[in-house]
Amino acid sequence: MNWLKVVGICFGAAVILAIGLLIGHFGIPGDTVPSTVQDVTQDLDEEFIQQFMKEVDTEKIRENLSILAKKPHPATSEADEELVRLMLSRWRDSKTGLDEAKEERYNVFLSFPDEKNPNSVKVLNTEGNVQFVSQKSESELHEDQKDPTILQPFLAYAPNGTVKGQLVYANEGKISDFQYLANITNLNGTIAIVRYGGIGRVNKAINAAKFGVIGVVIYTDPKDINDGKSNPVETYPNSWYMPPSGVERGSFKENFGDQLTPYYPAKEFTYRIPESEIKGISHIPAQPIGFGDARTLICQLGGPGAPDNWQGALGCPYNIGPGFRTGEFSNSDVQVNVYNKRTIRSSANVMGLIRGAVEPDRYIMYGNHRDSWVHGAIDPSSGTAVMLEITRILGTKLKSGTWRPRRTIIFGSWGAEEFGLVGSTEFAEDYYSKLRDRTVAYINVDISVFANATLRVQGTPPAQGVVFAASKQVKTPMNDLSVYDNWISHFNRNSSQYGVIPQVGTLGIGSDYAPFVHYLGITCMDMSYTYDRRVTSARIYPAYHTAFDTFDYASKFIDPGFTSHQTVARTAGNILLRLSDSLILPLGARDYGETLEEFYKKAESFQANLNKHGMSLEPLKRAIDRFKAAAGSLEESIKNLADVDKTPLKIRMINDQLMLLDRAFLNQFAFPDRLYFSHVLWATRISSSVATFPGLADAYQTAIESDHKHDWDLVHHQLTIAIQAVENAASTLETVTKL
Amino acid sequence: MNWLKVVGICFGAAVILAIGLLIGHFGIPGDTVPSTVQDVTQDLDEEFIQQFMKEVDTEKIRENLSILAKKPHPATSEADEELVRLMLSRWRDSKTGLDEAKEERYNVFLSFPDEKNPNSVKVLNTEGNVQFVSQKSESELHEDQKDPTILQPFLAYAPNGTVKGQLVYANEGKISDFQYLANITNLNGTIAIVRYGGIGRVNKAINAAKFGVIGVVIYTDPKDINDGKSNPVETYPNSWYMPPSGVERGSFKENFGDQLTPYYPAKEFTYRIPESEIKGISHIPAQPIGFGDARTLICQLGGPGAPDNWQGALGCPYNIGPGFRTGEFSNSDVQVNVYNKRTIRSSANVMGLIRGAVEPDRYIMYGNHRDSWVHGAIDPSSGTAVMLEITRILGTKLKSGTWRPRRTIIFGSWGAEEFGLVGSTEFAEDYYSKLRDRTVAYINVDISVFANATLRVQGTPPAQGVVFAASKQVKTPMNDLSVYDNWISHFNRNSSQYGVIPQVGTLGIGSDYAPFVHYLGITCMDMSYTYDRRVTSARIYPAYHTAFDTFDYASKFIDPGFTSHQTVARTAGNILLRLSDSLILPLGARDYGETLEEFYKKAESFQANLNKHGMSLEPLKRAIDRFKAAAGSLEESIKNLADVDKTPLKIRMINDQLMLLDRAFLNQFAFPDRLYFSHVLWATRISSSVATFPGLADAYQTAIESDHKHDWDLVHHQLTIAIQAVENAASTLETVTKL
């Protein structure tokens, strides 16, 4: 061998060794670190999201809806139980199902009309003869309505009784409405007829009772629901508007959750408070009627004319009473007859689960209620149809082995929502610790499509960014715009950070997100497709909670073609995947800073009076500044995170800070008399109209009115609560080793 | 080239390639995963623990103590502020300090005696002449006591007033004691003298007031504190026993924390409740005196003889009064004069921090209070001396770069503990969210050495295992046994899992662990070296809260040689390192199962009456079985965890389950009237003596006594709370993807 050969061989060997080194180092996955590497790397797959969105099928949604809305399925009915089995079979399907599904039952306190003893509103003359009786139920205008099990109109939990008195018209039943009447006439022993709108259903009766009223009749005015139209040729089945016989049913109570078992799941072992201790319900009978019947009553009322803004669209001048004007009903009384049955029934939630591959102990939740009042095609089956389409696509990917999310996804099909978010609240109580410690976010899609015009979203600020990201990737069904761009043209606001952006609304207690946000402090969002407010001023879609909310109605008037359903499925599914699969949680911290700043600006209107009573807003300002600095520097550090710093525990630390941000605003002592309300920023306000910290706003309102020292003390107490909540949230976002 | 050569070269190339592959794969650490690997691997270093324990230096502890106990340093005094500066300088030392240290101030409501207007107990004859007046303060028996700033004996928060009446002797001031007296005599307008012991300090006065008593005198009976010895030749400075002039000072209130700012840190912005709304304090004046003075009063009492078990060791028969027997004090009254000053003062916590290398967002806390009543050599400086020795050693390792814990360690030097755990409670309120979400455990060492005989530990069950592990590695100072083996000979119990083991006691509200366990639900432990109960029956070390608790006393009679201090430092430091450095948290889940089983067994005594009132213990039993199964399978899966499964997020998931176990027993609605109590298992019991779920036990006791339906309802409510807490804890331990 000559030296050239030696060099050649050595060089060759070196090259081969180098290749081996390179392949060995980079090419062969290590045996002992695969899941570690997976931990580091499993991130959102944008292509997968596109694939998911492509597969959302209007035909499947239509099919889902036709099955779901086939029968009236109020909570715990046989039809509801059939749907429980349907959900289970879908979610347990070996080709399109989830990893696991189960039903979970609670024995909850419900209220139903008595079939054999229908509620009614009657007009009785002085001899006691019946001159008028309200319609037993809606007129049957389409075969989709045909069903012997339709629940007759009633207000769940309205107390039973037969009460009789002179009728008065009390507008929307607000305190100010009754105050107005009381200044003119004696309300003791009267029956009040009020229209839906303005305030919560039950509050109309609670307010009425304070003025001596002994019974309440509630109806839907065509002015509020039908853009003024009341002629049957203009209403369903000829349009989406409510026919004269349509009656809005509903739950008649203030608090959500099972009334007898606050804070505890309604199981066999659970203590139940006596019914007499239930708070926030009416103590006088009440019954809803259609505007056809209402017209008969209101158009014959005597007494002075009602104020202009009390006038409706029944086609006559509204007088306030008391009693009827001379004519058919002269001297007649109105009688309200309520025969509801309160009962404890077993209601099921159906839960479905997809195990997370990397962070199984982090939950993304998605929920929708299952129970309706009647057929409930829109409320809630439009949402259920969407949820089932989302789970079908994800289930198919899962079962075929092409996808598993980074985090665990939990789907909830809630029972008994119509009775006041009962199923979801029982779930929140039952799973309290796990949900508190592990839930990243809850996505609620109740009614998925109210109308075809635009997306509408409510949520806490950390949800804003992910909703925007998703809505930019979905096209609207109606034009070539993205959902985002279309949305911004309907609801927008001027953000100090971003300029004009779509307006994300605040969460009240309108659907199943309530226990998650108010009790558990979980970042929540609620979405649907909704109205063009330039086209209709309907309070809600006109078939809401009536017997007209059928598949026919939905497919003819709400979403022909089901493209809005598809749009919501794409948007909600996109959001779900971003939350479940992103390495770093797509939750915004800085967006809360903006909210806090807005709250502060609103609170400044209190400043002079606060100062006068020895309080200062300065510490609140400092706390908000601290929060903004912490949020800013956290987001900055996320943005600048080098790949080598993306270690599993570093990422987890950041994600935990984001996950627990909403939790840091919880204070279970903030609203001692208000069931479940703990989120210092989002509790609903009671008396104040100032959109700032609700406890502070309400306390301020009370103190301004009474000017008692004790009430000013409560203002100081609430100011302390607000400051402390902001400080806690700031500290959650700050460097974890900051002392 | 022949084919053999070709084969040879190919083989050679293959070997070289293989070597390259192997080296490349196993030999070269990946650039992008170093901290990942560190995440996986950084575990406890047993050698480091041995090294730490070896370096614990009795001489350093003695030095610490002599500095700490040099001056009386009650909360917010100038001497306390000096110690704040001392702690800061130690923890900021560039060679032996921590990563960071800071002081954190709260403006808290305190109460002090008025130097110019000393409190007193007097005997006045019918002409109003003073026949006796209690000693202003302790006699000066050693130069260590010399100090002009010694707080005169008083009871913090006892209300001011001058009250005069006939004296009665009321034993320990229990309700049953006053009941006994009331059956014999009229207590209205009397002054009661009671001895320390049996029940809480302030409860003696709260009970007294219920029977018409208008003032209370409290003293320490030699029977309870001195094993009967009262002769000065037998007491300090000749022994550890309390001299006749010794007076136990103390806080006179039921609730812990700052009285004016419950649930919120006492900052400038914080709302303060009016003093009139403070709960759990006495409304009649009270004053403590020494047993020398008590002898003068009690030995001259008239009336019938007190029952046998009321008799003490003052050397005379104890009569109950009312009033004095014929003699020097015939017809004389006793007058209690209290002139305390309530005031808001700035009290500092000093916080020290060592950043965790791998999980900086997981905190191990270690705390001890700094404030004393007088010189406080034992209470609390024995604990502070130990804490400073632990931080010196760890700080030295840290600064020399030889060690950094896996998790973050936070040290707390609490202010104003003697006024009712004020500093630690303010900290818990101020840092609520961070602590709630991130704290693994809190170790409390208040008084580190009461006596030389044995370790004593109180804690929640998850702490048991780590305390045992540490105590097996430390030798006792007195014999050749391990601390564990010595401990077992003093306090032990029969465990269903382990056989005979040392008894870990339950946590009450005696020291700064209280806000952490009761309000935050953090796994807590409290430890010290203590008495041989075969040798002394002293209620507590006799110089407790007196002016005799000096360096001289501690070094002569409590721990000459400071070897017990050393033992506690070694044990507590060992525990701290196991918690901060172990890959998997050394917290036991199964040990809680044992507790729940014991609670259940105790609750079975309620069963017959529960059944009679429509309740069943079965659901509780089922919940406990579920808990035991979950705990068992979690511990099993930890034991069998293969190395490849030890991925950072898998370990973190398990650790979070263990960390949050105690948290799962929290229920902020469980004890609505009891400030801070939320831990369903460990709230102190009020009326029941049955060691089971405290809410259930107390409610049962009330219902048994009243037999009112409403009270049985409350039993059912508490039973529900207990079941739900156990269910929540079980679900925390179960597989995270279990629906």
Image (tube, coloured by chain):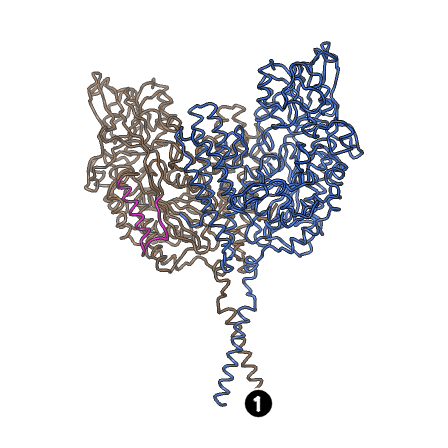
Chain colours: A brown, B blue
Magenta region includes residue A674: no
| Residue type, label 1 | Met
Residue receiving disc 1? A1
Q: Quadrant of residue B558?
A: top right
**How many discs mark residues in the rendered view?**
1
> Which residue sits furthest top?
B127
In this view of the protein, which residue sits in the foreground, A192 or B401? B401
Residue located 61% across and 37% down the image: B512
> Which residue sits furthest right?
B143
In the rendered view, tell whether residue B200 sits above or below residue A33: above
Callout 1 secondary element? loop
Question: Residue B723 placed where, x, y %?
Answer: 44, 37
* A646 left or right, relative to A367: right
Question: Residue A149 placed where, x, y %?
Answer: 23, 37
In this view of the protein, which residue sits in the foreground, B312 or B511? B312
Quarter of the image containing the C terminus of chain A? top right
Magenta region includes residue A79: yes
Question: Residue A235 placed where, x, y %?
Answer: 23, 38
In this view of the protein, which residue sits in the foreground, B146 or B344? B146
In the rendered view, tell whether residue B657 sits above or below residue B548: below
Quarter of the image containing the N terminus of chain A? bottom right
**Magenta segment:** A78-103
Q: Chain of mark 1?
A: A
Q: Quadrant of residue A325?
A: top left
- The answer to whether residue A400 of the structure is visible from this angle is yes
Estimate how packed mark 1 is, as few (under 14), some (14 to 19) or many (20 or more) residues with alpha carbons within 10 Å. Answer: few
* B701 left or right, relative to A305: right
Q: Quadrant of residue A210?
A: top left
Question: Residue A710 placed where, x, y %?
Answer: 53, 25
- The answer to whether residue A500 of the structure is visible from this angle is no
Residue located 60% across and 50% down the image: B578
